[in-house]
Structure formats: structure tokens, C-alpha cells
Image (tube, helix red, strand yellow):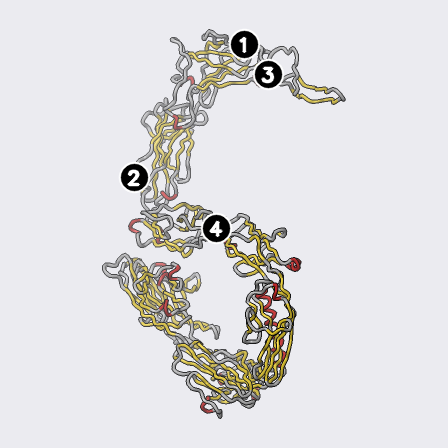
Amino acid sequence: LPLSLGMRLVLVTLQLAALLQYANTVSFPPTLTKMPPKEVAFNIGESIKLECEASGDPAPTFIWKRNEQEFDWTKNSGRYKKYPGAGTLVFISPGEDDDGIYQCLAKNDLGVAASVKTVLRRAELYNFAKEPDVNVERSSGDKVTFPCNAPTSYPEATIVWYRVTGAGTQTLTMSNRINIHPVTGALMFANVQESDTATYKCGVRNDIVRRTAEGRNYKLTVRTNVLYPAAQLMAQKPSVQSALVNKTLDLFCFFSGYPTPMIEWKKDSAKITTSEEWARMQLLDSGARLQLIDIDKDIHTGNYQCTGTNAQIGGSPPSGTFVVNVFSEPYWIEKPTDISVPEGGSHTFRCEAGSADGDPKWFINGVPANQYDNRSAPVGKEFHFKNLTLKDPLVVQCNCTNKYGYIYTNAYLNVLREPPTFVLAPADTKAAARSRFIMPCQTFSAPRAVVAWKKNGEPITGGRYQLQDNGDLLIAELSITDSGTYECTATNDFGSRTASGTVTVRQPTEISMAPQDTRVYEGQEVKLICTAITDLKEEKNLIIQWSKDGTIIDFDQNPRLTINLPDYSLIVSGAKPLDTGIYTCNATNGLDYDSKSAMLMIMGRPEMPTNLEVDCDKFKSDDIAQVKWNPGTDNYAPVLRYVVEFSTQYASDTWYVAPQFGSTEPTDTQVQVKMHPNIQYSFRVKGINVVGESEPSRSVTSPSCRLQPKIPSVNPTNLWAEGNRPQNLVVYWTPLSPLDYNGEKVSYVLIVECMNCVTMPKGSRNETQIVNPRQEKVEFNDLYVGNTRYNIEVFKKYRLSIYARNSEGDSSATRPESVGYSGEEAPTVSPDNFALDSGSGSDPLQSDSVLLSWSMQSDPEKDVDRIRGYFRGFRVEWCLSNLTAADCLVKKRFQDFIFRAIDGPSMVGTLNTRTKRQAVAAFTYNGKLTHLPGSTTIRAWVRVLNKYYAGPPSATVEFTTKEGTPGQVGDFVLSVTGVNHLEFDWQVPPQPNGRLIGYQMATR
């Protein structure tokens, strides 16, 4: 422990031990250590106790008074019991006759201490008077009030209202639409809705008797016709309110109207918000209740106004006003305390309280001072006693009162005649240089002793040494030269006592490397350093401790925090925002200490937003929902923006970013969201800062956020088609998002028309209804036109269109159109004139390639009947000429020459031909066949390609490639290592590319 703290604890401990030892020899009047409360409620037959305990010497006896008369509980010991050695009174089975005002008196030979007076009263709750049920019928939007004629209750009961339906009984939640009148207990609806149709009843709950009484039923039926009344003030608390300091006060306003009025509060014309400025004022029940917290006269005194507004308000909105005056129960400015004085001395008790009415009432030994036989009388706030003798000990009581309450205390006056006795004597001590040092010399005596000090036998006369009022010797800043023996002597008229102690001064402890302020993101590891030095003779006692925000860190309870023992640095692993705080390194050797602090700030993702509210009535005519929320804690990194998300009845676990309407700032906590017809919206909000995004807020769903259905406003998009096998047609599209359904029973109508079919008449159309709105393709093998079925023909052109419909009708949006082709088959034509191409004048044969040419009798891009699909190019296939036909089929290789790219539907109609050379009478093509083996005879042929198939082969051509560079040898390994030689093995290259004549080996 640090010197100042450690030594203080030692001094207090020794002093307490000495006082306890001294208390065994000195008598003193009673002091109450436990008193009963001012008011107690009880249930008949259930035991209770009134506590009363006191100290004193001789040990006090206890007396109880009831209604100002001494209460002899021993006459009925079966109903009462008192704790042994104390005054606590237990009522084993209290009854109606135990009501009364009780007071405990603790008495010994030196005085009487008196407790506060306790009002003991049985708890009770009467039943409601029998009343018939009431049937109430209202239109949607109308206001309703249901009275609650609450029965008598002690203590005051809590009023609740219940909603009863076939699903059960539930307690109503209060809001700006439904609330309880704070004075009468009536249930008020600002407006009723169809969902409010139910039975309601008032309940009165007394927590002491543990029972709830219930009143009559109000059966409410809400008609479907909707009224839109303007906001009106329906109820408020009285306009003048008295509040007590440090207590809580609720102001209440309730407005009727539809849509439900929004309630705004002002104090002295300033709007009350949820910002830190208004931290001691809290808006509850959606603004209907303004709660003033921990009331302070400067903060809460003033004029308050509540205002209710809705869309129907034409002029000035209705409002209620309040004047709040703040008062206080009496509070102590100076109160009497226990005192012991020497014989012949004097003492003045002072009793002063703030906010008290008039002077205090004084008592002596529980009796009014003006009725007590005493040589002194109080004067206002003071009670003076002089020339005291050993017969004058007593206990005074002081009571300060005003209309809001009272405070009450006891204090004893004891008279003593004693020689000096050490309460805390000097002792041998080690201390650190530069520290504040106290050598104790505290005594008890009557009259008070005079204390004198010596150092090493020489009187101490001042300078750096300061004699304290209690006899201690203070050295404000120790130095090495202060080492020595100190002696104190205490003297009064009845004797003298002397004691001494030796002081050894050490070099101070210092932190040489201190922690530094650090700021990091959550999840990172943090290291705070701390290195200290101390006196060489105290190094073995050096201890370094870490604390956070003034509390020593318990590393067993915080496993992410560890000490790195070599340098005593603090390691924080996986840092979290809750690790933010002031970290203090404290180094001590038991004599003194040094400490250094640093601020560690862990920036984390924000906490989720709270108090999410959704209003779909205010801007319903514009298809807009208003969403507002309270920001969560930013975890030391300011929120950069908020994201409002929504889900729908179609996928409640899928959340979309809500499109915002109008201009807002990224950090606004209120936005407007555009809504789609027939969507049941659930909203949530997330905050985002530089670290990341928060957890989402709780979601909110409101039935009023579902707009009336409409016809679809959009159609499916990205319409295209192609066949993927002979004689079929597959049509693709992007279906509507559920947000665009706009109603129920969503389907699509697909229209298909063949433009060049042989069997299906041109201009005839097939209409197919797609009943699954999530479907995104359909395959046709045939098409019906009326009752006539037509097979899908190979590679024919089809015109397509599609539109959406729902229960409200067909979409009015422009219908997308597209063109596609049915499935392909293998071409029936093969290329001609396949040969080596020497037209360029150079040798067509190389060691690894060959130039080839071929031709087509007609333009393959237009010869649809024989190509039977999109013409793409050609495929040259080859194998070794010495292979059989069967082996060649298995081991053949190929290379495609693509002259027309078909990447997807977006390319249809924009394809280009890459003809290398075209003759007058035929279409001629050439290409370079690569990656051939050298010095090898090869057989090759060519086929025409469409998108899915290759046509029949052309005539073959044989050729022999030139000799080329051999390929890499295989399995080259070191097989033998000798004293002066190495042996290697390898395999012939898999591709010799000619006749091998030898191998070349190189080393490095």
C-alpha cells in the first residue's frame, strides 16, 4: 500500500484498538446504532420487527412506548418478543390492536437516547363496489374514457388496466394513445382502432397485502368507419406542482385525436429532448409523461408546457401548462454529536437545519427540555452547558421540522476526570524521503493533556516540525536527515506519560517508464508499460499493481488482462470498448509509492439503436413511413451514418436497405421511407462508425404500415430465349422483386410468336400464364395456338414479350420484348478442299505447326438449313497417322478456329464474321494448327461448328512435321555418389521431336 494510505490504515486500526481497550474502563451514555423507520405497514398475522440497538457503558436497557405510554410487551409474550441484549421488538402475530405510534428508549445511568417515532399501521385493500358491466361502441378514431372508482387502500395502491380477449388477459402498456389518468385512474384512449375491440377492466394492486382488486368490465366495440378528429387536450395533472429535492416528479399530458397526436414538451420555452442537456428529465409513455429525476431546485424550477399536434390541426395546437416549485425536507447544516468533556468544563450543542420551520425542538433524555430539571435551557439553535460535574452526563435530542418532513438526532454529553492514557503512541517506523510523515502521539485525558516532543534528546521547537492539535508530530516532507529517535510526553493535572519511537528514512520510489495514453480499435492487443526504481534496501519489497478507474484489477476475473512479469507491463488482449478507462500503475515498497496513469480508449462498433418508433399514419397519403430512434452508445468512435432496413411478409429473415425519401444528414435519427403497396413492413436500424456496424435494433412492425394493393407498376426484365437441345425453346427473364408485387396472386403472361417456322403459321401467338412469381424460366417442346399443337422446329426465330398481373389487374408498364432461337442440331455439311496452305509463299510445315486451308461451298452464316444453328467456326482434329481408326478416335486432339463469337443473349444480332480469305466461287478459310510433335507424320481433318455441335469430317490430309528441339528428359536423378565421381540416370524425352543423336550435360 502507499505510505499515506497504508499508514493511515495502520493508525486508524491502532487507534480503534486503543479506544476499545479504553472503553472498557470509561462509562458513557447510550448511543443508538439502529432505529426503526418512520412508517411501517403490516399484514395481520405476519410477523414484523422494529429494530432498536444501542451502545453505552453501562450497557443500556430498552423501553418501548406506544401512543406516548410505556408499552409492556411482556404481558403477552406469545405475540411479542425482544432480541436479547438489544431493543429490537418482534411482533410475532400482529393484529388490529397493534396500530399505533411507537418509540424506543435506550437507557443507562448516564442518560436516555430516544429513537424516531414510528407509525405502525395494518395494510388493507377494500374491494370494488359491485357495478354492472358497461358496453361501449365507438367509431375508429374516436376518443374513449373508462372510469376507475378505486377502493380504499393502505399503503396507496397502484392502478393498472387489463385487456381481456379470447387469447387471455394482458396488462396494458402506456403510450401517447392509451394511458391512465394520474389522478382519477381512468383509462383513456386518444383514439380507438378496430384492433382495440376487447373487454377492459381496472385493477388496484397493493404489494403489501399481495392482492389485486378488480373492477367492472367495459366491453368496447369499434366500428370500421374512421373519424379524423383534431388534437385536443384530454387530461393533465394539476397545473401547479410541488416537487421535493432529490425525489422524482411526473408531469402528465394526454391529447385525443386521430392520427395519434405527437406530444412535445418545453421548459421555459426551450424544447426538451433526449440530449445530455436534459439528462435529468425523461420522456416516457411516448411523450405523455415527463419525469423529473433527482430533483434540483436550480434545474427543475420553472414553467413547463406540453403541446399535442396531428395532421388535422388547423390553427394553434392545444397545450397544457405547469408551474413547478421545488421544496426540500429539512436537511442538516450542523447537528449535535457525541462529546466527552473534562470535569468543570463546558460545551455548546448546535442544531441547525436547512428548510426547517423555526427553531429546533430540544429534548433531554427523551423529555422536552423545558420540562426537564436542568441548570441550562436551550436558546434557539444552541444548547449551552457549563461548570459540568460528574453528575451531569445526559443525552440531548434535536428535532427539525417543516411541512414535508422532519430530521431527528441524538448526542450525548459525558463528563470525565482522567490522567493521560495513550490511544496511539510513537513506534519504530521506516518512511520514504519526500513523503509526508506523521509520528503519532494521541492520548485520552480529562482535562486535555499538553504534548511536548524531543528528537535525539533535544526539544523540538518548530521549523520543519509541526505539532498537530491531537498531539501528533507532522513533517511535511521527509529528508534523509530526519532519521532519529523521537520522544513525546503528555501531561495534565492528574499525571504524565512518555513514549518514543525511531524513524528510518529511505530513498523514494519512482516510476521511471510510465504508461502512455493509447487509442486503438476493438480486437487489437494493447501493451501499457510500467517500470519503477526504489531504495536498494527495499527492492525486495517492491510491488507493482495495476488498477482501472480506481479499482485494482482482478486478473482472475479478467483473463484478457495479463501482466508481463519481466517489465510489469499490462497486456490487454482482444480489446473491447468496456476496457476503456484510466489505467494506473502503482509502485510501492510498503513505505511510499509512485503512480502514473494513462487513458486507454478502445474504439468499437456502436451499440444498437434503441426506442425505434415507426409512424405510418402521418404521411400515409404519400406512401411514406416515418422512422425515428435513439442512438446507441458510439463506443468512442462517432457514428458516421445510420442504415434503415426493412423486411417483408415474403421473407421475414431477409433485410433490405430502405430507400429514403427527401434529404437527410447521415447521422439524423429520423428519416422518411418510401413504401410499396400491399407490403407488411418490419423496420430496424443499424449504426455505422469507423470501426464497423452495430447489431441491428429490435425490429418494429405496425399494421398501419401496409398500403392498399394496386396493379403492378413494373414488368419482368432481361427477357431472352434460346434452345439448349434439338427442338426445344427455353425462355428466361428476371422475375419481379416481392416489393413490386403490389398485391396478391401475382403471375406473368408470356407471349411467344414464331417468325419463320414451317408448320406454325406466322403471326399466330402462344400465351402462357406463369403462376409462380418467383419462376425465372420456362421450357417449350411444343406450342399451343388455340387447340392446335405445334412442335418446336430446329433453330427457328421467335419473338417474345412478357407482362405481370395481380389480383388488381394487369401491369400498365411497358412490356419488354426480345427475339430468340430454338435449339440446334449437328450441321449436315462438311468443308471442302482441306489441304496444306502454301498460298503465302512460305513453307507451311514447321517442327511444331502447320498452315492449313479449306473452303465452304456457301456462306456458312447464311446456310442455316445445313449449319442448323449459329455458325461459330471450324474444328481441326488430328492424330498420328500410324494409329488405327479406332485408336485415332480415342487419342485424337483438336484445335478450334472461332470466326464468330456467341457469348450470350446480348450478342444476338451483333455478331461479326472473321473470314481470313474468300475466293470468288467459294468461301475459303485458313488457320495455323499448333502444338504438334516434331518429325512426326500426322493425319488431320476439319469440321464446321455451330454453338453446340460439330458437323461431319472433311477429307483427311497427311503431312510430316519438321524435326524440332527435343523435349525435356524424364526422371533425371543422381543414382551413385562416389569418392571422386557421380553417376546419373534419365529417361528418353517423351517428345523427342526427331531422331536423338546424344545428350549434353552441364554443371555449375
Q: Return the residue at label 4.
A: 603
Q: Residues within 10 Å of mark 1 (few under 14, many from 20)?
A: some
Counting residues from the start of the chain, the first of labels 2 and 4 encountered is: 4
Indicate whether 310 appears above or below 774.
Answer: below
- The amino acid at mark 3 is Asp
Mark 4 lies on a secondary structure that is: strand
Kind of residue sitting beneath label 2: Ser
Q: Amino acid at mark 4?
A: Met
Q: Residue 812, which numbered label?
A: 2
Q: Is residue 572 left or right of residue 615?
A: right
The residues bearing labels 2 and 1 have C-alpha atoms spaced at a distance of: 66 Å
Q: Is residue 760 above or below residue 272?
A: above
Image position, residue 834 (x, y; %): 48, 10
Please give the name of the residue rendered at 60% of the width and 71% of the height, measured from the top-left corner: 439
Of the numbered discs 3 and 2, the one sitting upstream in the chain is 2
Which mark is on residue 958? Answer: 1
Q: Which residue is mark 3?
A: 887
Q: Are marks 1 and 4 in contact (CB under 8 Å)?
A: no
Comes first in the chain, label 1 or label 4: 4
